[in-house]
Every structure is written in C-alpha cells, then in structure tokens.
Amino acid sequence: MLEELFRNGTLEMSASPVAGLAADLRWIDLLPNRILALVSVTLLVLSLRDLFLLIPHLLYCYDRSRGAEALEHSLGMARLRNGLAIAYILPFGLILDRFAVLRPAFWDAIPPAWSAAATVWLVSAYALVRTICYLLFRPRRLGAEAAATLHHNLYNYLFLALPLMLLLTLVWTMGQLPEALAGTVLRWILAIVWAFGILRSGQILRAYRSGLSTFLYLCALEFLPAALLVAVVVYF
C-alpha cells in the first residue's frame, strides 16, 4: 500500500540550483567572511589600548619628518607598532575586499567565499615584497635605526588611515550608499596616505644621501613594490 501511495508523487521543487541565488548573497552572508570579520573585530578590540598609546607618536610622524625617527628610537613603541601592523593586516584586507578596492582580472577564478582571504594574502604579499626590496637595496652607510625607520615609515601613516577606513565602512554599511563610491573614496585615501609616506621617506633619505641618490633609492624601495602591485591588479 505504501509503495502505491508514493509511486505517482511529483517533485515540485526544481532539481537545479535556483538561478541568481549566489549573486543575491551579501558579503557578510558568506561564512568565511563572517569568521574573518569576527576575528578582525576581536583583534581591533584587544589592540585598542595599544593603538591609543601609539596615536601621539603617529600624529608626530605626520607633523614632523623626524617623528618617524623618534618613534623608531623608542624601542617599546616600535615593537608595539610592529605587532599591531601584523594584527591589522586582516581588517585592512577585509575592508579592501568588502568594497572591491583591489580586483585583478584573475579574481573571477576565485570563489566569492575565498575572495577576502585572497585579498588579505595579496596585502601580505605586498608587505613581503617591500621587505625583500629593503633587504636587497638598503642604502649603504645607513645605520640600523635609520634603515628600520625607512622600512617602517609608510606603516606609520597607514595606521591612522585604518580608523578612517573603518569609519567609512560603518557609514556606507549603515547608510546603504553606493559601494562603487566607497571603493573610489578608499582608493583616494590610500593614494594620499601612500604619497605622504613617500614624501616623508624622501625627507629621511635626503638627510643621508644626495638628491639623485634619494630618488633612485625611493624607486627601488617604494616605487618598485607599488608598481608590482599595480601591475598585478591591472594586467593579470
């Protein structure tokens, strides 16, 4: 009897996935993004005290070129800054992915669920290439502290850009503003911060090298890693 009862049943639900379902998912709906966002928020909350301790030193870096040297001279603050730099790679990469600030052509081959992790990896790769350039092209007759100042100088300015990026993320998320506009604003913030960091790095180098030598070292230490990142985004 039971077999006869269910033999002529019909399937009302489509046997194929519903078209467009994946496209309707928001960034935060993806499980890997939720996990990474939770870890990121945890890191930010745990590091708030350290960030507040660093802020006066970071503001001094903006105000004076010797601010970076003073920060590097303080061993405790320098270690604090370096530790935070590692922790902040994750939230920084998540913001870039959330608003598609970095989108190489090959990103289409990456599943949406792993796009954020791939962006964090891309940011980490840029930092690694930049470190390799400093190891290869470090200016001669430059003391260890001055070389460390030059290496870490750019990160001093990115630190203060991150809270602004987080604020913009909150405004855009709560206000439901166009994400394309958010991506453009974030690109401008990063471009301005990077240019300011390069200016300060040039001033640091200028105290030890001639004008032409300063420019050549900036090309090897800063412009080369940035050019490689731009090449990956634009041509690959």
Image (cartoon, grey):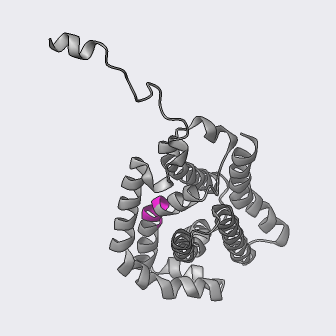
Q: Residue 154: within the magenta?
A: no
Drawn side of residue 129 relative to residue 93, left or right: right
Q: Which is more toward the observer, 82 or 20?
A: 20
Quick check: can you spot residue 26? yes
- Where is residue 18 shown, x and y percent of the image? 49, 35
Nearer to the camera, 163 or 35: 35
- The number of discs equals 0
Judge whether residue 143 can be spotted in this image.
Answer: no
Whole-percent x, y for residue 121 in the image: 52, 48
As drawn, is 8 to the left or to the right of 107?
left
Question: Which quadrant holds the N terminus?
Answer: top left
Where does the image place residue 140, in percent across and percent down from the top left?
67, 62
Quadrant where the C terminus sits is top right
- Please tell me which residue is depicted at 63% across the width and 84% down the height of the picture: 62
Q: Splitting the image into 4 quarters, where does residue 134 fall?
A: bottom right
Q: Residue furthest right?
A: 212
Q: In this view, does 5 lie to the left or right of 105?
A: left
In the image, residue 66 above or below residue 204:
below
Residue at image point 52% right, 38% down: 111
The residue nearer to you, when weighing 204 against 57, is: 57
Q: Is residue 73 left or right of residue 45?
A: right
Q: Please identify the dominant SS of the magenta region.
A: helix
Q: Give the range drawn in magenta.
A: 85-90
Residue 36 % position (x, y)? 40, 55
Residue at 69%, 66% (x, y): give it: 181
Picture residue at 55% right of the left edge, 77% below the top: 160
